[in-house]
Image (tube, grey):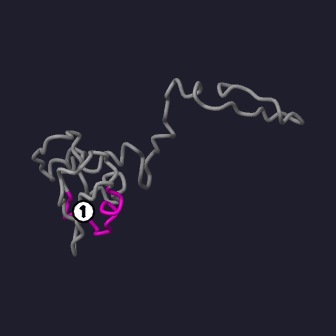
Amino acid sequence: MIELVSAERCIGCNLCVKVCPTNVFDRTEHEPVIARQSDCQTCFICEAYCPVDALYVSPYTDEQVDVDERRLAEEGVLGSWRATLGWGPGRTKLAAIDQTPFINRILPERPIRAAGISDVRSPATS
């Protein structure tokens, strides 16, 4: 559940307000306010979209937890979901390092691109 909007880091872009599917935030003149915390679905969308890692969504969906912003920042947890996804400048995208072993079984076949042979099909594992 959403636990923190960092007043220190927030730039007031309101992307979290725009992307939240359950309207958890209210806009203010400064940083958004968590107005309906119990409506949070713990989807992490707001944290993923925050360009300055100013949000913390706790993985506990049904209980509110006390958080310390300074400690979250020191431990590298503040905005960590965005970093895990690889969103943001200089970060490696999660898709680029995906090693899912079964992916070739679910991908559609790809055409073989040989000289003059464009209609031959091959399994995705080729």
Q: Secondary structure at mark 1?
A: loop
Residue 119 appears left or right of 20: right
Give how far across and how far down residue 88 sits, in percent.
41, 54
Left or right placement of residue 66 versus residue 16 in this view: left
Q: Is residue 48 above or below residue 6?
A: above
Q: Is residue 8 above or below residue 39?
A: below
Q: Quadrant of the C terminus?
A: top right
What residue is rendered at 18% in x and 57% in y? Answer: 36
- Residue 37 higher or lower than 7, as above or below: above
Answer left or right for 50 relative to 8: right
Q: Is residue 38 left or right of residue 86?
A: left
Front-most of 91 and 54? Answer: 54
Residue drawn at x 60%, y 31% as measured from the top left = 107
Q: Percent from the top left, x then y, of residue 56?
A: 23, 50
In the image, what residue type sits under mark 1? Arg
Structural crowding at the residue carrying mark 1, measured as other residues with C-alpha within 10 Å and reported as few (<14), some (14–19) or many (≥20): few
Which of the 4 image quadrants contains residue 42?
A: top left
Please give the range of residues in magenta. Answer: 5-20
Q: Nearer the viewer, residue 104 or 41?
A: 41
What residue do we see at 45% from left, 41% from top? 94
Residue 80 appears at what percent x and percent y? 30, 46
Which sits in the foreground, 88 or 29? 29
Residue 120, image x and y in percent? 81, 30
Magenta residue check for 56: no
Is residue 8 inside the magenta stretch?
A: yes
Q: Residue furthest left?
A: 66
Q: Quadrant of residue 11?
A: bottom left
The residue beneath circle 1 is: 9
Q: Is residue 4 above or below residue 8?
A: above
Q: Main secondary structure of the magenta part?
A: loop
